[in-house]
Amino acid sequence: MEFTYQAKDQAGQFFEGAIEAPSENIAVDLLHGKGYVVLSLKSTKKGIFSADLNRIFDRPNVKDIVAFTRQLSTLIEADMPLAEGLRTLAKQIEKAAFSKIIGNVADEVEGGSSLSAALAQYPKLFSPFYIKLVRSGEASGKLQDSLAYLADYLERTQAINSKIRGALTYPGFVIFAMIVVSLIMVVYVLPQLLSIFKEAGVSQLPITTRILIAVTNFINAHLTLIIVFIIGSIFFFWRYLSTEKGKIWFDGIKLAVPLFGKIFRNLYLARIAESLATLVKADISILDAIKITSDLVGNRNFQSILLDAEENVRGGGSISEVFGKYKEIPALMTSMVAIGEKTGKVEYMLGHVSKFFRTESENDIQNISQLIEPVLVFVLGIGVAILVSSILLPIYSLVGAV
């Protein structure tokens, strides 16, 4: 719920604004925690048509987080007070929803809260990894360095995700267009063309033509049922993927898909190595580092491996012992981690592992992008050849008979 308030601080200065809280009592407690004396507090009731549309259509994305993080790092490096820097950024952010969030963060910081605690109130925007690094920077006095690294980390992640989307966008569009065109042909064009052979009494048709006629007749006879079946299948598949069992199954499928499975695996391994290396370097305890990384990795298979490693380390074991038991973790990574544990340079070895697997995934993405186009052209060529031969060959036979 959102409440508007009027308050005074200990110096008697008047303030008014808005605050979000689950209840009125909690809102009052939050304002008291800032040192304010609450003069009035009113609930902002919103109807279904008066909702904050900025939160729906103007949500901040990764690019916005990267820009905010890098700009805040620059302002801190320039010795600007943190609260003032946050207010400056809030004013220049174009997206109203994000600007409001940063303004609230500035209020919290000005009221005596730490930056990490203020950002932690928005877990959908700032991950535990982000919060932990900010908190580490605050504790070590190197907040600017932590923010600069976070911006670089998020940019690298965004760049890789963009490459994957770019590699999948072209074939996805071509396949979608092919399905739409095929459906239009089967429903509107082919029935009229194929009816010519039936009216002419042609009995000796090529096998491809007979298959095309059977498919066309079946689809047109059961079109409604087919559409209902497809929509229902998509709905139930989506519901299944929203369950824990479905998520585990889908995460396993991503690692087993030919060509793309290797890319996903390398990306997950690079993410594990880089996250662990960064958190350990920031003096986060190894148990916390493993737990945070398990939440960040984005794959249930690797998450279970990391949780197993956490339990093993908690019991006095090592990470490499657990990694060596799973086929998802290559021997190279297990060996590098084992050497790092023996020499006390885990973060150093993990940094090299991260670079290796990130480079491997980027190279594979580039290779697949170059391979997809000729493969699609070849597949489309075969499809067009079958379609043309199924229609033209009987027509030539019919004309020859005349």
Image (spheres, rainbow, N blue to C red):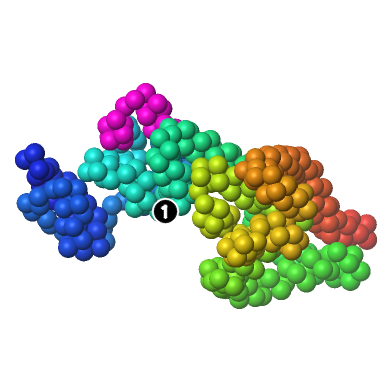
Is the C terminus in the top left, top right, bottom left or bottom right quadrant? bottom right
Q: Position of residue 272 (x, y in %)?
A: 62, 51
For the point 54% across and 57% down, which residue is it?
Answer: 287
Q: Is residue 330 left or right of residue 252?
A: right
> In terms of image quadrants, where is residue 358?
top right
For the point 40% across and 53% down, which residue is it?
Answer: 123
**For the residue marked with disc 1, what is the amino acid?**
Lys
Q: Position of residue 113 (x, y in %)?
A: 28, 45
Question: How crowded is the residue under tag 1: few (<14 C-alpha within 10 Å), some, or many (20+)?
Answer: few
Q: Nearer the viewer, residue 344 or 238?
A: 344
For the point 41% across and 45% down, which residue is it?
Answer: 135
Q: From this viewpoint, is residue 362 visible?
A: no
> In terms of image quadrants, where is residue 356?
top right
- Residue span colored magenta: 69-87
Residue 40 in the magenta stretch? The answer is no
> In terms of image quadrants, where is residue 23?
bottom left
Tag 1 residue? 124
Q: Nearer the viewer, residue 16 or 113?
A: 113
Helix, strand or loop under label 1: loop
Instruction: Decide: is 177 above or below 149.
Output: below
Q: Is residue 109 left or right of residue 32?
A: right
Instruction: Decide: is 272 above or below 197.
Output: above
